[in-house]
Amino acid sequence: HCRALFFFTLILLLYAGIASAGPSLEVEVEGIEGKLLENVLARLRIQVYSRDSDLSETEILRLYQLSEQDIKSALAPYGFYSPEITATLSQDEDLWSASYLIDPGQPVIINSVSVSIVGPGEMFADEFKAETPAMKKGDVLNQRVYEAEKRRVLRKAATFGFLDAEFLLHEIRIDRRAYTADIELQLDTGNRYHFGEIRVDQDIITEDLFFKFIEFDSDDYFSTRRLQQVQRDLYRSDYFSSVVIEGDIEAAEDLRVPVDIAVEPLNAYNRFSFGLGYSTDIRAYARFEWLNRMLNRWGHRLFSSVQYGELERYVTLNYTVPVVDPRFNALTGSGSWQKKSWDETDTTLYSTGLLYEYSTPEHYYGVSLEYLNEDYRVGETTGESQLLMPGVLWTWALADDIVTTRHGIRALIELKGAHENFGSDASFAKLKAEGRAIITPVETFRIIGRGSIGTIQVDSIDSIPPSIRFYAGGQKSVRGYKYRTLGPTDSSGTVIGGKILLTGGIEGEKQFSENWRGIVFYDAGNAMNDINVDLAHGVGAGIGVVLPFGQARLEFAYPINDEGEAQYVYLSVGTDL
């Protein structure tokens, strides 16, 4: 045991001697910061190898001699070609210290940028210009931006089908005395390619439906952008889990590029969701939804939603068929049952209808025909209404982020009506417009404005059911007043709804931390039968917390007018727009 301990101790001593035999090295760089410092530290070999415990003195001296070259090559890509470098190397026993004081000097400024296009693609010369030029006269020369610009020009050529494009000239001419640079790029586009055979590997939906998603034909000019758009459209269809689309450039013949498209089915086409919620206007509710994203090979969909709540219950069923261009158009048949209660009103609705819609990420247009049967009680009055209503709907939304919006706008216009001569109990025409806008004038403060306006052309408000009438009051209308408690009243004081709607609000939102917000607001509006009615006003404040799917808000409101029924606290969860 003693002999083993002796040899073990001897090994440790020898290892310690070996480990301490090599010199250590420290490197310090001063005078620059940011990207310049990062790039110098990444390229300065004496810094890169400073942690190597096996460095010898000879290697340290060799790396030190290379330092000035390393620093200059690290600064040059950012336009600094004449730096002043003060370098020192010192030794204290086994500790070596290398220090560098760097003055990057005067940067090289771009004097001119010339990008010229020759060959068959010369007609697209203007298209090659960037909307926001990455390099322009007066900018500091940056070789990384220069290389990125070359790649952008080549990508642009590919979007037009010029797959053999190459630079005849690409150079930076630097005048070191004047500290200026002239950049010249000359691109020869070469021949323009066409799409060749479109080869599809799929048996998920019908061939006719699948090819409606492909917005190009064989013999059209080849474009990488169009390939990317088809890939996005196929993903957006919600029929496929994977979409691979590529042009087989190596197999091109006679300037025609075959296109291969391969897709994979979704793992499950049925999607179920269940949730519990609470809204101040409709109180607690439970909701179940079922969506079958592809009921058959023709791409039909089935959607059902069931909600059971204190004040609002419904069952809906929608059957959707893609038509014309499945990327944008669909025909939906629907049926629903609803039961709603508010204030002194109870109503039960049965409806069925057809909807033809056109939708893009920003725009939505809908043309509908709906049959409505509604039984209702408003105060002491009861009634039943049957209406056959054609209608049109348009919405437009534009936002930098749908969930947490810094700048965005949304607008809606809806028109519907009925006539006694065409299967209805009453004649009316209803027009409603809504808008909401969000701006962020400073980094941590948002301003949110909204408004609604509407009118109903009808002889008597009593001839149409409550679901058609206008009401005001509630969280999305005029805060400080209970849901739908603002509007014309009958002789008993029950709010019965009106022919005209006018509401609006503005709020300021201050960000206090990453997820918490403070809110102040002012709302005004009313429902009425003539424009001489005074508006109700409400003010308040609240707090909000940002969630992955929107914002949860707790708001406290105060009604200024002695009208309707007061509501002081509001709780909601939803997206900004």
Image: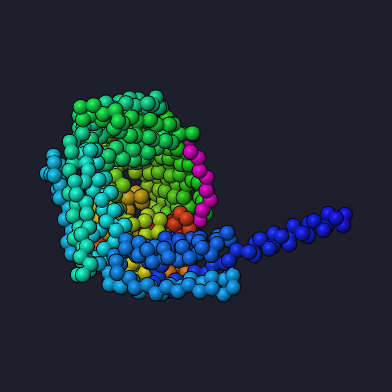
Q: Nearer the viewer, residue 48 or 232?
A: 48
Q: Position of residue 494 (x, y in %)?
A: 39, 60
- Residue 213 percent coordinates (x, y): 30, 33
Tell me the quadrant of the picture where the N terminus can be found: bottom right
Identify which residue is drawn at 19% across, 60% down.
182
The correct choice, above or below, for 391 with respect to 547 in the image is above
Residue 276, magenta (yes or no): yes
In the displayed structure, does residue 279 sit left or right of residue 319? Answer: right
Image vertical order of residue 411 relative to residue 388, above or below: below
Image spot of residue 160 (x, y percent) = 21, 40
Outermost residue toward the left in this view: 123
The secondary structure making up most of the magenta span is: strand
Q: Is residue 497 above or below residue 205?
A: below
Q: How far from the left and from the top, in percent, is residue 61? A: 48, 65
Residue 279 in view, yes or no: no
Residues in magenta, as a range: 270-279
Q: Residue at x 46, y 63 (%)?
A: 62
Of residues 336 and 130, the one drawn nearer to the viewer in this rendering: 130
Vertical arrangement, residue 88 with respect to residue 496, above or below = below
Task: Depth check: give the residue in front, 423 or 106.
Answer: 106
Pick the quarter of the image with the C terminus: bottom left
Q: How many marks do you count on the picture?
A: 0
Q: Residue at x 46, y 41 (%)?
A: 305
> Quick check: is 545 in the magenta stretch?
no
- Which residue extends farthest front? 58
Is 567 in front, or is 196? 196
Q: Quadrant of residue 324?
A: top left
Image coloring type: rainbow
283 lies left or right of 501: right
Q: Does residue 359 appear in this view? A: yes
The residue under the point 58% across, 61% down is 53
